[in-house]
Image: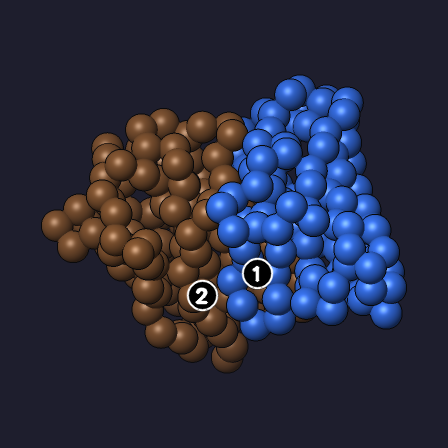
Chain colours: A blue, B brown
Amino acid sequence: QSVLTQPPSVSGAPGQRVTISCTGSSSNIGAGYDVHWYQQLPGTAPKLIIYGNSNRPSGVPDRFSGSKSGTSASLAITGLQAEDEADYYCQSYDSSLSGSIFGGGTKLTVL
Amino acid sequence: QVQLVQSGAEVKKPGASVKVSCKASGYTFTSYGISWVRQAPGQGLEWMGWISAYNGNTNYAQKLQGRVTMTTDTSTSTAYMELRSLRSDDTAVYYCARDPSAYYYDSSGYSLYWGQGTLVTVSS
């Protein structure tokens, strides 16, 4: 059981918008700690796509956006493309564990 | 360009130890930290801990305290992760990743650059 809860899977048709939630608690997201998002294609290392809740590293398309409110964060992907099909993970810090934590991951399927 | 190159796959017996290396290039090694993350087959990411390449400060995941040791060699810009008393559920791909926390563990840490991963298989 991950401390950060993500839906196991989401899906959408090409061109559509999907969102992936990341629900935490008062010891992590709710305490104000930043949330980061990673995309992982099969057999490859994770790739940072959002850092500091809503910032995109250079080279990440603006179709990807992040937000945070209360004890949750969300990743939104607009204009869905086949190449977006991957696993997505949120990451934050937990004061009770005194370390970083990941969500359980969400598999995005492009229909 | 920033690169993190990890050592090759390992097969270990239960109870043994493994030491994975991560050689950094393309940046000033001591200006960043290194985090270690593992991923069991078909499972999610698990943060293992962090080490400062500047002063050797560490922050280990509570779950692994006492079994894991992270070190660095600044002369070769290489980070190491040693895991002892291996069990079958330690079978995973182990990743190193550059962390912006240079001196002490920053709760806002994230990883832009990752190694290619090292598969560690624990089997009798």
Query: Is B26 or A99 nearer to us in this picture?
Result: B26
User: Residue shown at 25%/47% (left/top)?
Assistant: B27
- Disc 1 crowd, CA 10 A, few/some/many (<14, 14-19, 20+): some
Q: Write down the chain letter for disc 2.
A: B
Q: CA distance from mark 2 to mark 1?
A: 9 Å
Q: What's the amino acid at mark 2?
A: Gly
Task: Report helix, strand or loop for mark 2.
Answer: loop
> Residue drawn 54% across and 55% down?
A47
Foreground pick, B116 / B69: B116
Placement of A28 over or under A56, stated as above or below: above
The residue under label 2 is B117
Residue B57 or residue A64, whichever sits in front: A64
Is the C-beta separation of discs 2 and 1 under 8 Å? yes
Residue under circle 1? B39
Crowding at dot 2, Cα within 10 Å, few <14 / some 14-19 / many 20+, comes out as many
Foreground of the two, A101 or A69 = A69
**Number of numbered discs on residues:** 2
Q: Position of residue B116 (x, y in %)?
A: 43, 66
Disc nearer the start of the sequence (2/1): 1
User: In the rendered image, which quarter contains the N terminus of chain B?
Assistant: bottom left
Residue B110 horizontal side relative to residue A16, left or right: left
Q: Could you tell me if residue B21 is visible in this image?
A: yes
Instruction: Classify residue A93 as left or right of residue A17.
Output: left
Residue A82 position (above or below residue A46): below
| Residue type, numbered disc 1 | Gln
Name the mark nearer the viewer: 2 or 1: 2
The residue at the point 39 percent across, 36 percent down is: B100
